[in-house]
Amino acid sequence: MDASDRKILNLLYAGLNDASIARQLAIGHRTVQRRVQRLMELLQANGRVALGARAQELGLLRAPHTVLPAAQCAHLPPVVPRPYST
């Protein structure tokens, strides 16, 4: 398992679909599909949710409090706080 596989696992665990992962990592959609399938076989997971759970169980995911470098967040829209309503 290489660094790209770990990036895919983290993005998958964050809830991104294959197309979004492909855009985020600037790789092909089909490449993501093949790698996710290979990761499911490698980690003996029978689906995406099981793959994320297995990756977390094995300590393969980045800590949830880790801050992404600005370059990796540049495509995301700015966070705008919503007004508090009662």
Image (cartoon, rainbow, N blue to C red):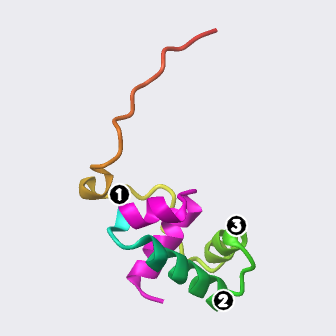
Q: Earlier in the sequence, mark 1 or mark 3?
A: 3
Q: Which residue is denoted by mark 1 in the rendering?
A: 68
Residue 52 % position (x, y): 64, 70
Residue density around tag 1, few if under 14, some if 14–19, many if 20 or more, within 10 Å: few
* Secondary element at image label 1: loop
Q: Hey, which residue is sitting farthest front in the picture?
A: 30
Tag shown at residue 81: none
Q: Examine the rendered structure and indicate whether residue 73 appears above or below residue 53.
A: above
Return the x and y of residue 54 as percentages of the image width and height.
68, 76
Q: Which residue is mark 3?
A: 49
* Amino acid tagged 3: Val
Residue that sits furthest to the left in the current view: 71
Between discs 2 and 1, the one toward the N terminus: 2
Image position of 1 (left or right of 27): right
Q: Which residues are magenta?
A: 1-23
Q: Amino acid at mark 2?
A: Glu
Q: Nearer the viewer, mark 2 or mark 1?
A: 2
Q: Nearer the viewer, residue 84 or 36?
A: 36
